[in-house]
Amino acid sequence: MAGHSHYKNMARHKAIVDAKRGKLFSKLSRYIIIAAKAGGGDPDSNLKLRYAIDKARSVSMPKDNIEKAIKRGTGELEGANYDEFMYEGYGPGGVAVLVEVMTDNRNRTNGEVKKIFERANASVGVPGSVGYMFERKGFFAIDAAKHPDEDALMGIALEAGAEDLKREDDVFEITCEPSSFSAVLDALQQAKIETTEAEVKYLPKMQKDVELETGKKIVKFIDALDDHDDVQNVYTDAILTEEMTEE
């Protein structure tokens, strides 16, 4: 059914954030800093850092910005200390929502994010309240028009460690365990298969249909969260159609 595609479900919001290039670079810098702080500055031995760098390069983040972020994470350059945590809650219509945050001031961020929830008549839940409804997966989206051979694509993906490949309209969606993300990405790149999305993210185990007006409220709510400097990613189990995302 149209609208069930994980790629299309959030593509509009990704495009909105990408359009705010300066804000996007700031968010990706934080991601690199935290990854380097946790596992060191070598992407060959730090999978999280490699993924963060790949994501930054995919949106043409300057090399100098990436290198400075790594050095801030390893302590070679001074910089703010960031904490990484998750909000779980319920959006308009009771849909499940996960909000990934990276901040240098938990109290400030906590107050501001809760206000965004309140304005949308949404509610922040306790840890674990909706997290069980999602699973963390490596995810790839591929334009089926550019790579129409599904059998060949499936062979490449599965051999590299992917769990599943399915077609949703004009998009192939590949999922894998986070630990297999780099291997699958390398295999796709070596086969010269271009991805329209490649990242590790939270996917809902089940998606939820919502009415049109509720869907519009959810879109507005997610946009408000995305616009916050400290919010890295927003995930929901709601099925958002193109009609819901139109202004």
Image (cartoon, rainbow, N blue to C red):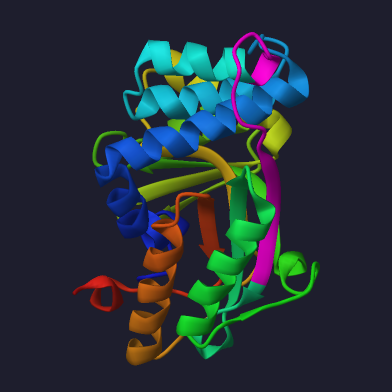
Residue 176: tell me if it is visible: yes
Of residues 79 and 209, the one drawn nearer to the viewer in this rendering = 79
Residue 102 drawn at (x, y percent): 61, 45
Horizontal and vertical percent position of residue 150: 41, 40
Q: Is residue 134 left or right of residue 188?
A: right
Q: Quadrant of residue 208?
A: bottom right
Residue occupying the far left of the picture: 247
Relative to 44, 187 lies left or right: left
> Which residue is at 66% across, 9% downward?
42
Q: Is residue 214 above or below residue 87?
A: below
Is 69 left, or right, of 45 in this rendering? Answer: left
Q: Is residue 151 above or below residue 70?
A: below
Residue 202 drawn at (x, y percent): 62, 54
The residue depicted at 73 percent of the width and 14 percent of the height is 40
Give the image quarter of residue 73: top right
On-image quarter of the N terminus: bottom left
Taking the image as drawn, is residue 240 in sight? no
Q: Is residue 176 magenta?
A: no
Q: Where residue 37 sits: x, y (%)?
A: 71, 23
Q: Identify the magenta region.
A: 73-88
For the residue pair 171 and 203, the one nearer the viewer reads as 203
**Residue 143: which quarter of the image?**
top left
Report the front residue among 5 and 25.
Answer: 25
Up-down: is 54 above or below 71?
below
In the image, 193 versus 52, the foreground residue is: 52
Magenta stretch: includes residue 83? yes
Q: Residue at point 57% right, 26% down?
A: 32
